[in-house]
Image (tube, rainbow, N blue to C red):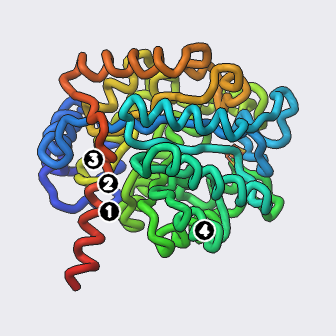
Amino acid sequence: MPPRVKEILEKDFWRKEDIARLLASDEDEIIFEKAAAVKSAHVGNKVYFRGLIEYSNRCAKNCFYCGIRSGNDKYTRYELTDEETLTAARFAWENRYASIVIQSGERSDAAFTEIIEYLIRKILEATGNELHITLSLGEQSEETYRRWLNAGAHRYLLRIEVSNPALYKKLHPDDGLHTHATRLEALAALRRAGYQVGTGVMIGLPFQTFDDLADDLIFFRDFDIDMAGMGPYIEHPDTPLYRFRDKIPSPDERVRLSLKMVALLRIMMKDINIAATTALQTLDPLGREKALRVGANVLMPNLTPEKYRSDYLLYENKPYVHDDAGACGADLESRILSIGNRIAYGEWGDSLHFRERLNQVVSI
Ligand code: SF4
């Protein structure tokens, strides 16, 4: 007889079959309870804000699931001006968010590399070096990663999207620009460069199995990530993957699976930072609160100027497209308080896992 959920939860180390069994089980509440206890014991009830600046929707890539893929001509392409970027960063600083995330479609040309380096320096100068900066700008050379780190960036988020190379292939064009091996190498380069490294996956994709999701969690553990951002896959009508929408779980099932992934990751990696993603709220109005309850500890209020937001739709029905930054932050605050968590204003909220690894290196 396969082990019961309770027995698996008591083990110190999970094998792939344990994780797949937990994902397939319908005993969600036991899993969520355990994850909530682990969160409380290891990272507490603080929620860290990362003000999200969607710098540009220009992208050289053409991923089959993404609304801003280069092949989609329905969006007006934009990039924020320097002043708009600095204003958004100043808003975060003045409202004591302590950290921002600069996210963009992927470009690796010299002009892009330079402007990002320039903006990192300007933001730090304008905010008295008090903001911590996370970058989410895709695959770059190790030299570029180091350049941006030297300019003052602290963390980097590069989602693997799926750890199964065969599934990765199904989700990306076969044009040499989108390879699983390159993505892995980019993550390794980020680690070598010295960033706090975050990654993540989409949950509920067509063709994805429980075994795939179990492998995703094992990938996070083996790579020893510092941060994670995972959310449900949400179909976008202007993408090639949309034609497989009858092969994906229902929205409720995708939310449930995403919450389980968050909970299981919290149990497996007790001191990392885990984001409650906006995609969860898209499918469930209370999705992010639920994620905070079962293990997440990071939220990303959107600081992108409102006029650009409807051109940065990676998926359909994204929330806060028409709210200003203040309204978005205030709404999140009341949601966080409603579940007994509190916002850690003015705290960087670095990954404790990263700090611990640094301490180990120093003491060797
Ligand atoms: S997922 Fe990222 S790299 Fe792929 S098309 Fe969208 S923005 Fe570009």
Residue 275: image x %, image y %? 39, 40
Judging by the rendered image, the residue that carries numbered circle 2 is 351
| Mark 3 touches mark 2? (CB < 8 Å) | no
114 and 135: which is toward the camera:
114
Q: CA distance from mark 3 to mark 2?
A: 13 Å
Residue 183: image x %, image y %? 61, 63
Q: Amino acid at mark 1?
A: Phe
Q: Amino acid at mark 2?
A: Ser
Label 3, secondary structure: give it. Answer: helix
Q: Amino acid at mark 4?
A: Arg
* Lateral position of residue 72 relative to residue 201, left or right: right
266 and 109: which is toward the camera:
109
Judging by the rendered image, the residue that carries numbered circle 4 is 147
Q: Residues within 10 Å of mark 3 (few under 14, many from 20)?
A: many
Judging by the rendered image, the residue that carries numbered circle 3 is 266
* Lateral position of residue 300 relative to residue 108, left or right: left
Judging by the rendered image, the residue that carries numbered circle 1 is 354
Q: CA distance from mark 2 to mark 4?
A: 22 Å
Which residue is at a point 57% across and 70% down the rendered structure image? 146
